[in-house]
């Protein structure tokens, strides 16, 4: 074995195993897939419909139909009574326009009828035309003496001797007046009839 070879030659260097360069694998970029969020359903908005104000209908005024009013027969006011007082008649007496009247149950001639009224503190009835119209609606089918006569005279007068001024018509030819449902008539005093008394009311 030659020394020269040991010193004059270089032992060729050992080849080192080549290093493998690792090329990093390229990771493909992640593709972000957008997540689709489902759209929330839209709540329908409430549309407020304006309330229509009805247009008032103008109704033409009604033309009033004229009413025919029959004028009542004028009735004069009742006999005046003291202010603040109350007209009162006794039991079984009828108050008519401020006077109390009583209708008899029995019958008598005119003079007996007058006496019977005086016993009761009254007189054979004196009445106004208005009172007469009311009283005749109460007599029914009977006839009633009242205080009007013309005995011994051609003029009618009341039992208190006051004059009768032809305030109503007296039918017949007798001298003593009586009342029935149709009005005032006259007869002779001896005839039996019912009678009517009158007097002032209590206050």
Image (spheres, grey):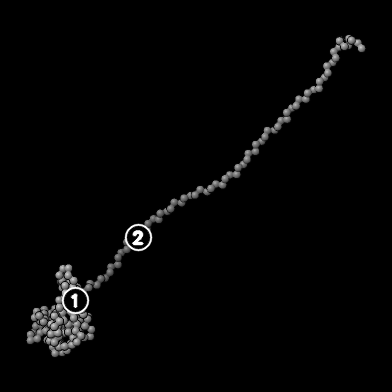
Number of numbered labels in the structure image: 2
In which image quadrant can residue 1 be found?
Answer: top right
**198 lies above or below 2:** below
**137 lies above or below 13:** below
Disc 1 marks which residue? 89
Label 1 and label 2: CA atoms lie apart by: 58 Å
Disc 2 marks which residue? 59
**86 lies above or below 184:** above
The 10 Å Cα crowd at callout 2, few under 14, some 14 to 19, many 20 or more, is few
Q: Secondary structure beneath disc 2?
A: loop
* Quadrant of the drawing holding the C terminus: bottom left
Q: Are marks 1 and 2 in contact (CB under 8 Å)?
A: no
Left or right placement of residue 160 versus residue 54 in this view: left
Q: Residue at x 39, y 55 (%)?
A: 55
In which image quadrant can residue 29 be found?
Answer: top right
Q: Residue at x 78, y 25 (%)?
A: 20
Q: Nearer the viewer, mark 1 or mark 2?
A: 1
- Point out residue 136 in the picture as x, y percentages from the top left corner: 20, 81
- Point out residue 164 in the picture as x, y percentages from the top left corner: 11, 80
- Point out residue 71 in the picture as x, y percentages from the top left corner: 22, 72
Q: Earlier in the sequence, mark 1 or mark 2?
A: 2
- Point out residue 42 in the picture as x, y percentages from the top left corner: 55, 46
Q: Residue at x 15, y 71 (%)?
A: 81
Residue 171 seen by the camera: no
Residue 191 seen by the camera: yes
The 10 Å Cα crowd at callout 1, few under 14, some 14 to 19, many 20 or more, is many
């Amino acid at each position: 074995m030659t020394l020269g070879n040991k010193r004059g030659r270089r032992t060729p260097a050992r080849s080192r195993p080549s290093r493998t360069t690792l090329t990093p694998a390229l990771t493909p970029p992640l593709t972000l897939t957008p997540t689709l969020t489902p759209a929330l359903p839209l709540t329908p908005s409430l549309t407020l419909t304006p309330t229509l104000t009805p247009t008032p209908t103008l109704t033409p005024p009604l033309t009033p139909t004229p009413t025919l009013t029959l004028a009542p027969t004028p009735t004069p006011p009742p006999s005046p009574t003291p202010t603040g007082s109350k007209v009162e008649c006794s039991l079984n007496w009828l108050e008519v326009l401020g006077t109390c009247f009583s209708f008899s149950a029995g019958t008598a001639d005119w003079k007996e009828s007058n006496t019977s009224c005086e016993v009761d503190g009254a007189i054979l009835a004196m009445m106004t035309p208005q009172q007469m119209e009311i009283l005749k609606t109460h007599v029914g089918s009977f006839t009633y003496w009242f205080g009007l006569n013309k005995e011994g005279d051609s003029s009618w007068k009341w039992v208190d001797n006051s004059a009768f001024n032809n305030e109503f018509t007296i039918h017949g030819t007798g001298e003593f007046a009586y009342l029935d449902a149709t009005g005032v008539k006259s007869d002779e005093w001896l005839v039996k009839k019912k009678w009517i008394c009158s007097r002032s009311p209590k206050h």
